[in-house]
Amino acid sequence: MTDAPPPAVPTAVVIVAAGSGTRLGHGLPKALVPLAEAPLLLHALRGAAGSGVAQQICVAVPPADAELTEFCHTFAEELGDAGPEIDVVEGGATRADSVRAALAALAPGTVHVLVHDAARPLTPPEVFHRVAEALNRGALAVIPAMPVVDTIKSTAPTEGDAASIAAEVVTGTAVREQLRAVQTPQGFDVGTLLRAHEVASRWEPDQAAAITDDAMLVESLGTPVYVVPGDLQSFKVTTPMDLHFAETLVAAQGG
Ligand code: CTP
Ligand code: MG
């Protein structure tokens, strides 16, 4: 395990945990779904706090949530003075809204922020360290990413007679070597990320609905987004199969 980079400047982690987990279909908000008997959020919190990169962790939970908030408070008590400050805010209707709510609660003077999905419970500390180090070296935006293993094609709906053959037809094939599958935590200079979210808050609903990460907002400002290696274990729990895979990994590692 690499050591945490020295906290060059005041740094926070935002954990977005306000999603409903529709694709997981568990019946609970996804961050509450248990993995090895602890909610996904608790795994993500332990990972972020254990990495040692931040003085504050701000968690966005579903509106009117009591249970996840309670987990955060209990975790904060367990950490005591030794760990980062843990704050909880109400998330919003979209992931971007949840990020914005958490950014508004960062301690004054925070310079770097790492935005992380609660749905990535097994992100190793090394990934937090790589992102924090790139920020310390001067990046305004940095993402962890993995090479893509599948060939990625674009498609369009079929029309006319072709629709009786299949619903979609291929329109192109991307160059796989240039593609990356992007993970979190994504790291930013706070002022840059606030500006990017402020601009995006005025986007049309269609455009806003297509926001899937924070880096794409910073890209739209023309700011370079640097890439560091992610980790296979930092996969996002999206479907029941992902949860099963996470359970298997934790069991194999003796957890
Ligand atoms: N998220 C959030 N607020 C939202 C939507 C998503 O904080 N309004 C968070 C989720 O809690 C998750 C992360 O963003 O940690 C990534 O989102 P995703 O994997 O899509 O989770 P859900 O939106 O909960 O799942 P689904 O899309 O299947 O409903
Ligand atoms: Mg979602």
Image (spheres, rainbow, N blue to C red):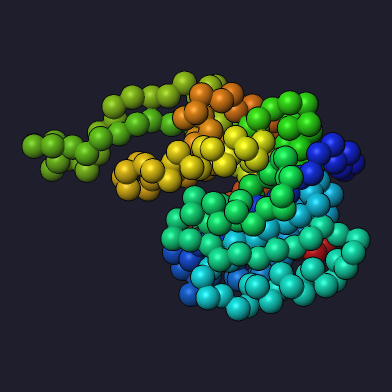
Decide if residue 220 is in sight here.
yes
Tally of marks: 0
Left or right, residue 41 beside residue 201: right
Q: Residue furthest left?
A: 161
Residue 198, placed above or below residue 36? above
Which of the image's four quarters has the N terminus?
top right
Image-quadrant location for residue 104: bottom right
Residue 197: x percent and y percent?
Answer: 50, 42
Residue 135: x percent and y percent?
Answer: 73, 32
Residue at 61%, 71% (x, y): give it. Answer: 32
Which of the image's four quarters has the C terminus?
bottom right
Residue 55, placed above or below residue 171? below
Relative depth, front residue between 130 and 158: 130
Relative depth, front residue between 89 and 116: 89
Residue 237, placed above or below residue 110? below
Residue 10: x percent and y percent?
Answer: 79, 44
Image-quadrant location for residue 214: top right
Relative depth, front residue between 187 and 173: 187
Left or right, residue 184 beside residue 178: right
Residue 88: x percent and y percent?
Answer: 65, 65
Decide if residue 51 is in sight here.
no
Residue 179, placed above or below residue 166? above
Residue at 75%, 63% (x, y): give it. Answer: 86
Residue at 42%, 24% (x, y): give it. Answer: 174
